Image: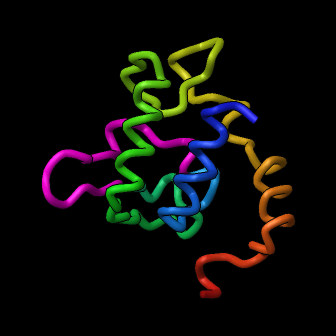
């Protein structure tokens, strides 16, 4: 598993958001400076079509800052493609295989909506 994939999974866990939404984060969706860091997921990227305001914990901010360092200065994507920096990472938008294995081994076969 790559470091980027690990960060995607960790962010999904600490934000209770879908893997695909986390993998597709555009840096413009993030506001991590100040007293109330937040991630605004636009409705075009959510399952229900409504924008989603996700408050970010200190751990989530730390993970995002790690991902920013890993993104090698990409201006748009938090998890950019390794081959075309203008696109989000196609392999990183599909971390379901490692996620599925982790979820099965840990017993996390639930969704945030069932909690």
Q: Is residue 48 magenta?
A: no
39 part of magenta stretch: yes
Magenta stretch: give its range: 22-40
Q: Position of residue 14 (x, y in %)?
A: 50, 62
Number of numbered discs overlaid on the protein picture: 0
Quarter of image, res 95: top right
Residue 109 drawn above or below residue 17: below
Left or right: residue 43 compared with residue 22: left
Quarter of the picture holding the C terminus? bottom right
Classify 3 as above or below 97.
above
Instruction: Tell me where residue 21 appears, x and y as whole percent.
Output: 56, 52
Residue toward you, 50 or 101: 101
The colour scheme used here is rainbow
Q: Position of residue 104 (x, y in %)?
A: 85, 66
The residue drawn where x is 76% and y is 35% is 1
Q: Residue at x 45, y 59 (%)?
A: 43
Residue most extreme to the top: 83
Q: As rendered, which of 24 and 47 lies closer to the eye?
A: 24
Instruction: Report x, y in % for residue 64.
Output: 41, 42
Horizontally, residue 95 falls left or right of residue 113, namely right
Query: In the image, what residue occupies the spot 57% across and 43% down?
Result: 7
Give the answer, above or below, for where 47 lies relative to 77.
Answer: below
For residue 89, which quarter of the picture?
A: top right
Image height check: is 24 above or below 76? below
Q: Residue at x 57, y 53 (%)?
A: 10
Front-lying residue, 75 or 72: 72
Side of 14 where 69 appears, left or right = left
- Spot the residue most to the bottom: 115
């Amino acid at each position: 598993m790559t470091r980027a994939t690990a960060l995607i999974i960790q962010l999904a866990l600490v934000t209770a958001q879908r893997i695909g939404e986390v993998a597709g984060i555009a840096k413009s969706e993030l506001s991590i400076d100040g007293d109330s860091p937040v991630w605004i997921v636009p409705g075009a990227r959510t399952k229900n079509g409504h924008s989603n305001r996700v408050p970010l914990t200190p751990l989530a901010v730390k993970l995002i800052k790690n991902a920013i360092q890993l993104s090698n200065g990409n201006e748009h994507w938090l998890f950019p493609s390794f081959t075309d920096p203008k696109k989000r990472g196609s392999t990183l938008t599909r971390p379901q295989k490692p996620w599925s294995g982790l979820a099965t081994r840990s017993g996390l076969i639930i969704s945030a909506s069932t909690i």
